[in-house]
Amino acid sequence: MVATIGSAIRTVVLPRAVPARLGSVVFVNMRRLFELRMHRVTSYEERDRIMAPYAPLSLFVLAFTWLVIVFIGYAAMFWALREGSIREDLASSGSALFTLGFERPDGPATTALSFTEAAIGLTLVALLITYLPSLYAAFSARESEVAMLEVRAGAPPSGVAMIERFARINWVGGLSSVWGRWERWFVDLEESHTSFPALVFFRSPQPEQSWVTAAGAVLDGAALHSSTLVEHDPDAMLCIRSGYIALRRIARFFGIPYDDDPRPDDPISVTREEYDEAYDRMAAAGVALKPDRDQAWRDFVGWRVNYDQVLLALAALVMAPYAPWSSDRSSRFRPRALRGRNFSAGRSRSWTAWARRVRPGGDSAG
C-alpha cells in the first residue's frame, strides 16, 4: 500500500523527474502487448495507427492498477483483523474504497481502515482529475509549435527546407525569432516530459508529425545557420544548447546512454555527401554561405555531435515518422524490446545492449 501511494505521488504530484517503479512495470508490459500487434506490420501508417492509443491507454491501466492494489491490500487488512470470509472482506474493501457505504465496520480497527481507504480512494480520483488537464495542457502547448513548424520547415520537417523557405521570401533574418521561440519550447519540453514521462509517447494528431522530428529539424536548421551561413546569429547557438540539454535530460530519464563530453570531430549520422547536398540547395536558394566548405562542415559536425545520438535514440523510442537526418536513420538504434523493471528509472537492459552499438557523441562546440 505504501509503495502504491508513493507511486501515485511520484507520478502525479512530484514536479521533478523521479521514476516510479509501478508505472514502469505498467508501461513496459503495455508496450510489449502493442509490439505483439505490430509483429507483421510493414507500413508506418499502420504502425502509427496501432501505437496512437498506447500512452493514453497505459495511463488508464496505471490508474486502474492503483485502485486494484488498494482494493486487494485493504481486503487483506480486513481479513487480518477479523474472523470472516474473504468475500466479506472484499465487500468491505470495495464499499470503503468507492464510498458506497453498504458495509458498516464492526470495530475501531476496521472503522479506521474504512476511513483511510475511503480517503485514499477519493484522493486518487482527485489527483487524476487534476493530473489529466495538466498533462493535456502540456501536450497542447507542445503540439501547437510542432504544427506551426510545417509552415516553415515543410512536412516532414527539415532544417535545410526551413532555411530555403526563409531565403525565398528574402527573410533569412526572421530565423532569429524562430530560434528564440524554440529555445523556450525546449525548456518547456524538458520540464514537462520528465515530470510527465508519458508525454514522450503521446503521438501528434497528424501521423506525419512528431515532437522528435520537429526538434531535430529546428536543431539542424540552427546548426546549419551557425556553421554554414555568413550571417552570425547568437540566438541559433543558444537554441542548439537549449535543445540538446532538453533531449539529453529526457534521454537520461529513460536510461539512454550518451557521451556528455564528446570531441568536435566525433562521427555523426549525417554524411559529408548529405551535407554537401544541403550546402548546394541553400546556395541555389540564394543564401549567403561561407566560402570554406570544409571548415563549415567541421563546424556543423561540432554542433550536430551535441544532439545526434540522443535525437536518433528518441526517434527510435517513440517510433517517429520519417524525417530527414533524424528518424530516417534511427532504426538501427531501436531496441529489440523494452525490457527491465526499471524502464522509467533508466536501467532497462535493452538500452545497455543498445549502448554497445551506438557511436559516441555529446557536448562539443556548444
Image (cartoon, rainbow, N blue to C red):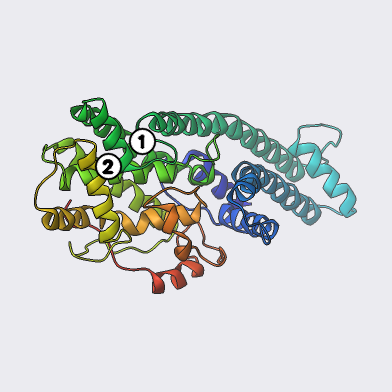
Specify the quadrant of the image occupied by residue 236.
Answer: top left
Which residue is identified by label 1? 153
Specify the quadrant of the image occupied by residue 92.
Answer: top right
Residue drawn where x is 9% and y is 48% of the image: 291
**Image spot of residue 254 (x, y percent):** 45, 57
Estimate the spatial distance between the alpha carbons at disc 2 and disc 1, rounded to whole Å: 9 Å
Q: Which residue is more in the foreground, 120 or 52?
A: 52
Q: Mark 2 and 1 residues: CB-CB less than 8 Å, in contact?
A: yes
- Outermost front residue: 284
Residue 178 seen from this side: yes
Residue 242 seen from this side: no
Q: Is residue 12 above or below residue 363?
A: above
Q: Which residue is more in the foreground, 147 or 257?
A: 147
Q: Is residue 58 left or right of residue 272?
A: right
Mark 2: few/some/many CA within 10 Å (<14, 14-19, 20+): many
Task: Assign a secondary structure to mark 1.
Answer: helix
Q: As shown in the figure, which amino acid type bears the numbered disc 1?
A: Ala
Q: Which residue is more in the foreground, 355 or 293?
A: 293
* Disc nearer the start of the sequence (2/1): 1
Q: Is residue 141 above or below residue 38?
A: above
Q: As shown in the figure, which amino acid type bears the numbered disc 2?
A: Gly
Q: Is residue 104 above or below residue 240?
A: above
**Image spot of residue 53 (x, y percent):** 64, 43
**Image spot of residue 265 (x, y percent):** 18, 65
Mark 1: few/some/many CA within 10 Å (<14, 14-19, 20+): many
Task: Assign a secondary structure to mark 2.
Answer: helix
Q: Which residue is more in the foreground, 28 or 293?
A: 293
Which residue is identified by label 2? 221
